Amino acid sequence: METSTLIYCALALSAGCFVQSTVGFGMAIVAAPIVYFYEPRFVPGVVTFVGLILALINMWQYRRMISFTGMSAAFVGLVPGTIVAGWILVYISAEHLALILGAGVLLAVLISLSKVRFKPTPKALFVAGFTSGLMGTTTSIGGPPMALVLQHAEAGKLRANLAVYFVFSCVLSLIALSATGHFSLWHLKYALIVLPAPILTTLLAYKVQHLIKTEWVRYALLVLCTFAGMAAMWQGLSPMWT
């Protein structure tokens, strides 16, 4: 693999890690489309592994604001969602599933912009966890469903709880990807090669995240969710145009 390809992928992942460390999520939304352009084999495996390391770092950084009890329903929903995603990938393409899920995310964003307010009830968190498991395993972009449900939380708690959730979801996604042949030692090797740059930008993000207001975080979440839905639909439609 060319060195320039690794550099571009590392820079894309670094930008994504900076966004996620300041807003709460968004690493895959920013990085995955760029990484896919330069090296399609890095998506979703390499992106998901870097996301796991990022989530572990963020979970430690915001550990005092974590609410494991409040997120339990999301964890329960995540397991079957990830299993179903792994099963679906055996029978249908990830592109077709990405198209459906992307449309669903865009619809949820439109609902959020209306007077309807998502409340983080156990049922809503379960559904968000299930949908996130589907999206994370098939597209490496699993944050939008959870972010939409938690969008009205205080910024620090939002970052903390999403970090915990991403640790759990990334581990399950990597297990599912390994079982279906989409994550191997080859992916792990290149993930470790590009990892230093994302870690450095994550540490930089901690220096400026206190400047970001809670309301700005919510608007950023909605913008990122919109891009996520569009990116997922693009991933689903692009094979039809080639």
Image: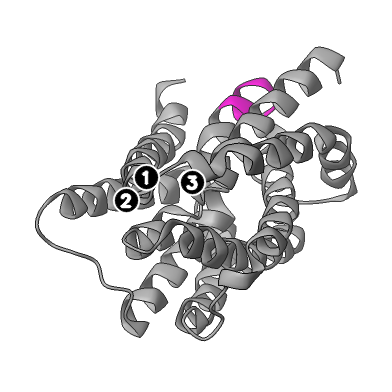
Tell me the number on the disc at residue 225.
Answer: 1
Q: Amino acid at mark 1?
A: Cys
In the rendered image, which quarter is residue 212 located in?
top left
Closer to us: mark 2 or mark 3? 3
Whether residue 103 appears in magenta in the rendering, the answer is no
Q: Amino acid at mark 2?
A: Val
Q: Which residues are magenta?
A: 34-39
Find residue 242 and report its horizontal and vertical position in percent: 47, 20
In the rendered image, which quarter is residue 89 located in?
bottom right
Closer to us: mark 3 or mark 1? 3
Of callouts 2 and 3, which one flags the residue occurring earlier in the amino acid sequence? 3
Find residue 2 and report its horizontal and vertical position in percent: 85, 15
Alpha-carbon distance for marks 1 and 2?
7 Å
Give the vertical position of 184 relative to 162 (above or below). Answer: above
Could you classify mark 2 by the number of other residues whose Cα lies within 10 Å: few (under 14), some (14-19), or many (20 or more)?
A: many
Front-most of 161 and 166? 161
Find residue 131 and report its horizontal and vertical position in percent: 42, 65
Tell me the number on the disc at residue 105.
Answer: 2
Residue pointed to by mark 3: 23
Could you classify mark 1 by the number of other residues whose Cα lies within 10 Å: few (under 14), some (14-19), or many (20 or more)?
A: many
Q: Does the residue at mark 1 contact the one at mark 2 (Cβ under 8 Å)?
A: yes
Label 1 element class: helix
Count numbered badges in the picture.
3
Closer to us: mark 1 or mark 2? 1
Find residue 48 and report its horizontal and vertical position in percent: 67, 50
Q: Amino acid at mark 3?
A: Val
Of callouts 3 and 1, which one flags the residue occurring earlier in the amino acid sequence? 3
Q: Is residue 210 visible?
A: yes
